[in-house]
Image (cartoon, grey):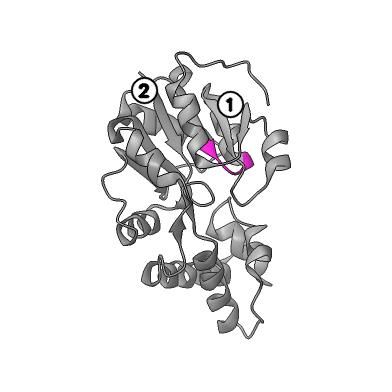
Amino acid sequence: MKWILLDFDGTVVDSSGDIAAATNHVRASMGLPPLEVEEVLRHVGAGAEKLLEDLLPLERGPELEKKVAEWRAYYVAHPAEHSYLYPGMEEVLERIPPSQAALVSNKPEDVVVRVLADLSLEGRFSAVLGWIPGRPRKPDPAMLREALGILGGTPERTAMVGDGAPDMEAARALGCRPLGAGWGFHGREVLRKAGAARILDRPEEILDWWEETKVHQGAKE
């Protein structure tokens, strides 16, 4: 048996428009001009606090925390106005049994659950883990370990698919196969440097690994 762990933003769902909208809503509240989606995406992957720390003229502290709360409130109210499944991901989620699949995201868990509901993706995963207080974010492998505990899986028979360095680093730390989502936000070079065993061009290639009879842990692209 195999198991699959999937990152969310930039891997399962293209949420770039909604992330940018929430970010620009907070910027507008401070009298700052909007940013292009591409600029916002350069700072996505390490959580809302780091995103806003990078894109607002604020240091970590109470004021930044207030803006993070505003960002989350806006996002929860507008979770999927511009978000959509990447082409080909529907087939992947239909082929892989929910009992063998989990979602592991650095996005706040309440936001992940809300987006899944708005995109009618409930029930596609046996475990949905996002950031909650006290749960380390990737690249710490704790979230992946927790997901596998729920699934009953083992790292050596598991692939972690994600578009960012934290996904690849967490997978390697736990002993899962790190598969890079080359269609995502961060690009192939980031994935290569982070140690992706293979960089996929489109979601359907996840099924190539799924249908293999064994995991070739030593393979490199």
Q: Classify residue 146 as left or right of residue 170.
A: left
Q: Amino acid at mark 1?
A: Arg
Q: Decide if residue 127 is in sight here.
A: yes
Q: Which residue is mark 2?
A: 153
Q: Nearer the viewer, residue 145 or 5?
A: 5
Residue position marked by numbered label 1 in the rendering: 172
Residue 51 within the magenta-colored segment of the rendering: no
Q: Residues within 10 Å of mark 1 (few under 14, many from 20)?
A: many
* Image position of 97 with respect to 105: above or below: above
Whole-angstrom CA distance, mark 1 to mark 2, is 16 Å
Q: Residue 45 location, x and y as percent?
A: 58, 51
Q: Is residue 51 left or right of residue 109?
A: right
Q: Residue at x 45, y 31 (%)?
A: 207
Q: Label 1's element?
A: helix
Q: Residue 207 versus residue 78: which sits nearer the camera?
A: 207
The magenta region covers 161-165
Disc 2 marks a residue whose amino acid type is Gly
Task: Give above or below for 155 relative to 45.
Answer: above
Front-most of residues 100 and 113: 100
Mark 2: give few (<14), some (14-19) or many (20+) Cα within 10 Å.
Answer: some
